Each structure stands twice: as structure tokens, then as C-alpha cells.
Image: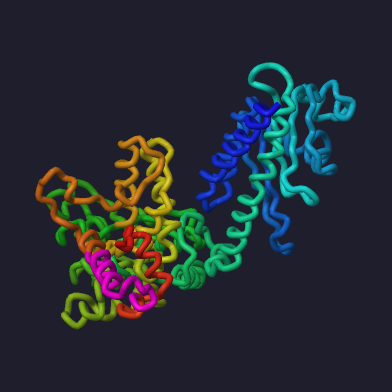
């Protein structure tokens, strides 16, 4: 008897430890997926279904339930969901008690239920999650090894339902908090912005402008440093505009020599130049009815600028070598990381073209202006690397996320994305399940004595670490004083200490 009790305690401890391992998840869907996989394996079930309903959210906009299935077809999932109003699940939710049936087909409580008869349901274990007011349900059906679920399976399922509840409550609370404090939410409802990552005030300001310009057939000039996402915003404007069903054509003005750029943009008549052996349609013609996006527009030669100005003024243009005007129906969105006002002062950019393009100024913020988005961006880039490169399952560790959040990214979102992708490749090569700080910021000394040049990011990182460590040492690790010297928030200094792995020497 004592041995059985000891085994039971050990099983309970093992389950809770596994749930704790999942507790670092910040989104409820991946947490539920891994939690269900854990309990399905533990019970030896053929099929599993886990559903959580956030009934404590705002009644004005009730959220859809979060549901995860294992070993179930789409039809079976639909049948399980239908059982919320009748059948085994309905009984468990109504009574707040676990349902254990060796064969639902033979159980007098359920054998006459339509879903039970249709699906020939036999071994069933269903435990409500939450007592007086169930928040959800765990539903297990069929044993991998034929036979009923055991009393031990029932105890484990109830233990799982009890232990998983605090994690679910926390994740739902944090989700509601993000939802309520997300300044981008009102604008996302008006746009096709599913792929845009970030909930910062800086992103909200950009989205607000997008909602204003997207429905209007006006030119747009997007400014901002390299890697801030100007192309993505241009695409968002197009996708959210009346032209969304027509082409979005992109031309990077810095990738072609000046003598070819005009032909690439406006097309060329046969014989207009040595390579024009036939009539060539340009990007303007390709974008007919849609949007022409000119990236790095400051690189256009003055002659091409004059032609672009004519296009914007009259919606007509002349292909290279042709005297016949062509009508156009395009919207022009331009982007640059150059100070166009300074370029105008130098005579390198036409003033009249600038004011034609800049109907409503839109500047993309640097990543340093939206550091609260870094964790979400890094997690997104990691998941995308796993999917596109077919890597084993990986996620960013808490330490790596904190390090990413506190590091400088002079190359902005693009640099962060490339760094996370490289880190995911290194982590996958080691066979680990998490991307750690050492993968994201590799130590150049590990290159077996080879001379390795520090990147700007690595040099800045090392300087900050050394500076903070020295400051803390001189102030006997008085964090408040150490924060005052460089004029930082104390909470940020604590984050830096953790990110750098600094420890007080005893």
C-alpha cells in the first residue's frame, strides 16, 4: 500500500514538473498543444481533444474557444465539438465530474445519444477543467492498447485538469491584457495586417496612417532606415486598398544602372537600345490597375525622375524611344532611407517630384523605437525558420529573448530576422530544443584562435556588458545608483544584468 502511495506521489510530481517545463510558453495555443500531447501519451489514448473557453473576457466581443486535437480527423473533431451540447462532454460539463466509461455504446447514460451511436464510441474518459464553473474539458477516446481506461487513468486526468488550470488562467489573463492594451487593435480590424508583427505605440501610429491612405488613390512616400519594413507596409497599403485584386509590382531603383532603369520602369520601343530587339513592357505597364512600388526612389537619375513626375501628373508616360504617349492606371508608392530634403539641396532629387510623392508623410520607426516588439518578432522569426528550413521543433529560450530585447539592432527588423534564423540553424545543428543566447550572439573567441572581426552589434553588446559590470562593481552592486549614472530605468538595468549574465562577486 505504501509502495502504491509512493508511486502515485512520484507520478503526480512528474506530471507537474512536465507542466512546469511548458510554463514558459507565452501563448495559449502552443501550451495546450504540448499539454494535450503529454496527457494523451500518459493515458495511452488513441484520440484526444482539449478545449478552453475564455468566458471571462469582454462580453461585447466573446472570444472563440481554444481547441487542440490529437489523432482526430476534421470530421471527428466536428463530432466532438457537437457533443458539447449532448453526449459525454455535455454530461461532464453539466455535473462538473469526470466521466469514465468502458464503452459509451453500452453505457445506459450515453448509448442512446446520436453522436455515440454514429461514431461507435467505446472507451471514453472526459474530465472538466475547473470545478464550480468549468473553463474547458479534456476528452480522451479509445485506448491504443484495446480495453477501457483505468481508474489510474481517471486519477491522472483529474490531476492534469487541476494542475493545468493555473497555467491556463495565467495565459488567458496575459492574452486579455495584451488584447486590452494593444494600441494597434482598432486599426488591424480595418486592414489586412495579419502578417504584421508588433503591438507597440510606434507600430500603431504607422497603422493609423495606413488606414487613412489605403482607401485613397494617392501617392505615398515611406521613409525610414534600412530594414524597418518599408516594403511590408507598402504591400499592406496595397492589400487594404481598392486595388488589392490587381498587381503589386516592385522595383528596387538601386539595383539597376541608370541607362537600364528608365527602360525597366517605362518600357522601350523596338530598337530603342541595343538589347531592345522587340517592344519591351516596363514595370508601369505590369502594374496596370494595381500598385507600383519604387524602393530606394532616391537612386533614380534626374531624367527618370522627370518621367516619373509626368506619370504622376498626367497618368501618361512615354516608353524609351517612343513618341506615342501611353495611358496608365497605377498607384505609386515610393520608399527611401535617404534624406530627400538634403538630396534636394544638393540638386540630386527634384523638389516638384518630392512634393508629388509626399502627399501624406509616413516614416517607419527604427527597432530601437519599438523595443517592446522585439520578443514577439524574435519568436516569429524562429517559428518561420523552423517551418521554411524544415528544422526540428525549436523555440527561443527566455534568456535569448531577453538578450534580443536588450541588444542594439542597427540593421533593424531585417538584422534581427537574419540573426534569429542563423541562431536557429546553429541550435538545430546541436540537436537542442531551444535557441539560447550563445546561438544568437556567438563568441568570436570560440573560432579556435582565428581572427574574427566583431560586428557593430557584438562590439556594442560587449561594451554595454563591460560598462554595466564595472559600474555595478564600483557602486557595490547598488542597482538604483547604477541606473542613475547612465540615466536608465532600474527595471531595465535588472533586465540587462540578466541578459548579460552578470553576477556579483563574493
Which residue occupies the extreme bottom position in the image? 345
**Outermost top residue:** 146
Residue at x-position 54% and y-position 45%: 20
Magenta stretch prevailing secondary structure? helix
- The residue nearer to you, when weighing 363 against 255, is 363
What residue range appears in magenta? 463-482
Is 83 left or right of 50, judged from the image as shown?
Answer: right
Q: Position of residue 49 (x, y in %)?
A: 67, 36
Above or below residue 187? Residue 386 is above
Residue 303 drawn above or below residue 14: below
Give percent across and percent down for residue 40: 62, 31
Which colour style is shown? rainbow
Specify the quadrant of the image occupied by residue 77: top right
| Quarter in which the N terminus is drawn | top right
Query: Could one spot residue 295 in this view of the protein?
Result: no
- The residue shown at (57%, 46%) is 29
Instruction: Classify 220 as above or below 396.
Output: below
Residue 162 visible, this orientation: yes
Q: Position of residue 137 (x, y in %)?
A: 72, 41
Report the label total.
0
Q: Is residue 208 left or right of residue 332?
A: right
Magenta span contains residue 479? yes
Amino acid at each position: 500500500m505504501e509502495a502504491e502511495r509512493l508511486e502515485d506521489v512520484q507520478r503526480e510530481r512528474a506530471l507537474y514538473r512536465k507542466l512546469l517545463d511548458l510554463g514558459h510558453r507565452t501563448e495559449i495555443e502552443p501550451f495546450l498543444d504540448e499539454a494535450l500531447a503529454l496527457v494523451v501519451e500518459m493515458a495511452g489514448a488513441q484520440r484526444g481533444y482539449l478545449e478552453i473557453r475564455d468566458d471571462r473576457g469582454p462580453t461585447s466581443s466573446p472570444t472563440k474557444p481554444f481547441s487542440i486535437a490529437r489523432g482526430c480527423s476534421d470530421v471527428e473533431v466536428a463530432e466532438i465539438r457537437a457533443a458539447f451540447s449532448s453526449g459525454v462532454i455535455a454530461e461532464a460539463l453539466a455535473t462538473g465530474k469526470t466521466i469514465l466509461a468502458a464503452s459509451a455504446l453500452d453505457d445506459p447514460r450515453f448509448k442512446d445519444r446520436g453522436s455515440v451511436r454514429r461514431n461507435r464510441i467505446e472507451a471514453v474518459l472526459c474530465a472538466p477543467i475547473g470545478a464550480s464553473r468549468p473553463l474547458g474539458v479534456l476528452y480522451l477516446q479509445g485506448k491504443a492498447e484495446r480495453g477501457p481506461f483505468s481508474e489510474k487513468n481517471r486519477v491522472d486526468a483529474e490531476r492534469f485538469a487541476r494542475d493545468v488550470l493555473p497555467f491556463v488562467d495565467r495565459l488567458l489573463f496575459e492574452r486579455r491584457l495584451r488584447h486590452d492594451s494593444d494600441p494597434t487593435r482598432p486599426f488591424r480590424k480595418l486592414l489586412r495586417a495579419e502578417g504584421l508583427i508588433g503591438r507597440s505605440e510606434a507600430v500603431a501610429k504607422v497603422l493609423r496612417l495606413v488606414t487613412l491612405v489605403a482607401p485613397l488613390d494617392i501617392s505615398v512616400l515611406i521613409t525610414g532606415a534600412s530594414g524597418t519594413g518599408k516594403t511590408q507596409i507598402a504591400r499592406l497599403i496595397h492589400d487594404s486598398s481598392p486595388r488589392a485584386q490587381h498587381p503589386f509590382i516592385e522595383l528596387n531603383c538601386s539595383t539597376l544602372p541608370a541607362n537600364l532603369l528608365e527602360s525597366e520602369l517605362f518600357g522601350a520601343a523596338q530598337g530603342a537600345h541595343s538589347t531592345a530587339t522587340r517592344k519591351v513592357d516596363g514595370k508601369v505597364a505590369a502594374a496596370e490597375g494595381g500598385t507600383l512600388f519604387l524602393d530606394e526612389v532616391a537612386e533614380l537619375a534626374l531624367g527618370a525622375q522627370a518621367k516619373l513626375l509626368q506619370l504622376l501628373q498626367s497618368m501618361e508616360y512615354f516608353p524609351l524611344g517612343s513618341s506615342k504617349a501611353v495611358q496608365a492606371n497605377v498607384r505609386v508608392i515610393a520608399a527611401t532611407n535617404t534624406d530627400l530634403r538634403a538630396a534636394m539641396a544638393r540638386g540630386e532629387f527634384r523638389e516638384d517630384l518630392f512634393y508629388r510623392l509626399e502627399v501624406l508623410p509616413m516614416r517607419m520607426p527604427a527597432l530601437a523605437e519599438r523595443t517592446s516588439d522585439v520578443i514577439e518578432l524574435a519568436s516569429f522569426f524562429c517559428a518561420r525558420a523552423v517551418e521554411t528550413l524544415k528544422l526540428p521543433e525549436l523555440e527561443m529560450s527566455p534568456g535569448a529573448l531577453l538578450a534580443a530585447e536588450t541588444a542594439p539592432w542597427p540593421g533593424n527588423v531585417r538584422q534581427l530576422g537574419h540573426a534569429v534564423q542563423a541562431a536557429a540553424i546553429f541550435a538545430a545543428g546541436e540537436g537542442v530544443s531551444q535557441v539560447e543566447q550563445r546561438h544568437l550572439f556567438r563568441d568570436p573567441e570560440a573560432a579556435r584562435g582565428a581572427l574574427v572581426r566583431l560586428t557593430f552589434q557584438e562590439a556594442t553588446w560587449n561594451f554595454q556588458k563591460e560598462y554595466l559590470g564595472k559600474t555595478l562593481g564600483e557602486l557595490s552592486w547598488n542597482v538604483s545608483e547604477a541606473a542613475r549614472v547612465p540615466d536608465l530605468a532600474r527595471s531595465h538595468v535588472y533586465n540587462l544584468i540578466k541578459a548579460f549574465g552578470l553576477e556579483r562577486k563574493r
